[in-house]
Amino acid sequence: MKVQYLLLIACLLVACKSKHTKPDIDSSKIKKLKVLPASYKSATKIKATVIDTSNTDNEAAYANYYILVADTGINYYTLRDIMFDLNKSSDIPIDTMERGYNKAKDLIALSDKDEDEIYAGEYYPRRFPSKTLSFEYLDTYQYNTSPKTIALVAGIYESKNSADSALQVINKLKTAFVFKGRVYAGCMH
């Protein structure tokens, strides 16, 4: 069993440069591996993430961004209608990151046939600055929120001024807000 985990960990370290990540962690700083708890695992896949646990405030792996949320809810289709209306009225582009809604899993997810074998059929979050509309799970950016709450994100910004300026563009939505989020920007494999 230990040999299987060692092989899995070795594969994950080699695969760390996926199309979905930026090469932003010095692999020489990785000291310990932590496997995600069973609640994060798919029934058919074993998933793991590499986390530097030697320093709980590993600044290289996290970024403070300002997230602009147009609206939140649990109904994907209602939020999708709002997203299309907002796209038309504000010209903010839509970027799904090749994700769609999987009705069977009740999940915003990559295709089951995505080339990234680890995240195929699973949710993969937007983690870097972007001036686009997308659906994200709010608990990715804001702790102590329901894991199924969907956020219609209207952008992720590096500065509060930029986020506040973008908020003015969509100010007709009474549900829109900006908050500072600590976003994991390290390797997701």
Image (cartoon, rainbow, N blue to C red):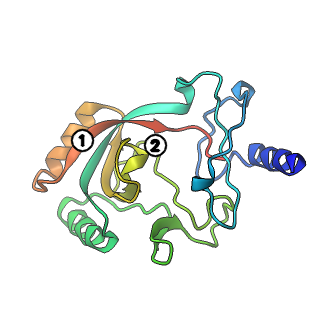
Q: Which residue is mark 1?
A: 178
Front-most of residues 17 and 79: 79
The residue positioned 46% from the left and 43% from the top of the image is 128
Front-most of residues 34 and 126: 34
- Residue 134 picture location, percent across and down: 37, 59
Could you tell me the amino acid type at mark 1?
Val
> In 3D space, how far apart are the residues under numbered discs 2 and 1 (Cα atoms)?
16 Å
Q: Is residue 4 left or right of residue 102?
A: right
Q: Is residue 64 left or right of residue 53?
A: left
Of callouts 2 and 1, the N-terminal one: 2
Name above or below for residue 130 compared with residue 164: below
- Residue 78 picture location, percent across and down: 26, 72
Which secondary structure lies at badge 1?
A: strand
- Residue 106 picture location, percent across and down: 45, 71
Place residue 132 in its image quadrant.
Answer: bottom left
- Residue 5 picture location, percent across and down: 81, 48
The residue positioned 59% from the left and 46% from the top of the image is 21
Name above or below for residue 182 compared with residue 141: above
Mark 1 neighbour class, 10 Å CA radius: few under 14, some 14 to 19, many 20 or more: many
Q: Which residue is mark 2?
A: 128
